[in-house]
Image (spheres, rainbow, N blue to C red):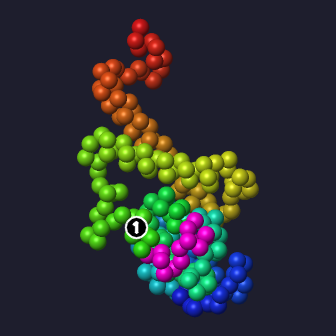
Amino acid sequence: MVEDGGGAPAGPGGGDDPRAAQRREFYELGRRVKDLMAGGMGRKPAARAVAAESGRPAALALKASAFAGRYSEADVARLELARTSEGRTLPVTVLARLGTVASPGDRDHLVAALGRGELNSETLPAAIRRRKGVSKSGGGPRRRRPRDPAEGLAQVREATREWLDRHDRAWAGQPWLAGPVADGAAAPLREVRAMLARLAAAAGELDRALERAGGEATGTTPAPADRPVEAAHD
């Protein structure tokens, strides 16, 4: 059962720590919700379906889906090394809190800090608030539309750097794709490929807009894509 049981202090391997099974069940609940969503079901109906299958509350399945949608198996393995201030492994409530963090850069920072012992379950909530930079009203500078080119470029630079940093550290070279994709990962694979296609299209559209803006700023006309830059100024 997914609870926040006390659990005895555990070594890196987890031993007989009951929280290890609770964390695994929480992650699998979330993955099941994501699989149903990839098949076309809405998030709340999927959570209700998983709740009916598992006997767990739908609210818990919703929280689990947020976590599973934002964290990889490697992240979960890193979190196994984290401890509370009493030396116990992390309760499920910590995973649920981490599931609320939208920024990939913030997630990486928090998971790494937990793994190194710089954060624990007691200090995590304040760290999440600091990383999010979100006010009590729910707003925040990370989510607002840029007011001018300088602010927009700063936002794009920050978000792109975060994505590329994580790609270079975790995904580049694809050794994690050396083996066959398991049946249970087929739906997430389709979802990720669709998201990457959307990312590529959005990045291309934004790059073309930046090229046009750059031409206007310098008083030049950007060269067509199929012509060398030198030819545009002959």
Q: Does the magenta stretch include residue 147?
A: no
Q: In the structure shown, which secondary structural element does the residue marked by tag 1 occupy?
A: helix
Residue 32 visible: no
Q: Nearer the viewer, residue 186 or 169?
A: 169
Residue at horizontal 29 percent and vertical 55 percent from the top:
144
Q: Name the residue under label 1.
A: 130
Eyeballing the image, is 180 above or below 155?
A: below
Q: Position of residue 74 (x, y in %)?
A: 64, 64
Eyeballing the image, is 212 above or below 68?
A: above
Residue 153 visible: yes
Residue at horizontal 42 percent and vertical 21 percent from the top:
224
Q: Quadrant of the N terminus?
A: bottom right
Q: Quadrant of the C terminus?
A: top left
Q: Nearer the viewer, residue 40 or 190?
A: 190
Q: Where is residue 17 in the image (x, y as percent from the top left)?
A: 67, 86
Q: Is residue 91 left or right of residue 221?
A: right
Residue at horizontal 53 percent and vertical 77 percent from the top:
120
Badge 1 crowding class, 10 Å Cα cut-off, few under 14, some 14 to 19, many 20 or more, is few
Disc 1 residue type (three-letter): Arg
Q: Where is residue 55 in the image (x, y as percent from the top left)?
A: 52, 87
Q: Nearer the viewer, residue 174 or 118?
A: 118
Q: Where is residue 229 in the image (x, y as percent from the top left)?
A: 45, 18
Residue at horizontal 58 percent and vertical 87 percent from the top:
86
The number of discs equals 1
Q: Is residue 16 left or right of residue 132?
A: right
Magenta segment boundaries in residue numbering:
112-125
Q: In which quarter of the image is residue 118?
A: bottom right
Q: Does the magenta stretch include residue 115?
A: yes
Q: Nearer the viewer, residue 112 or 177?
A: 112
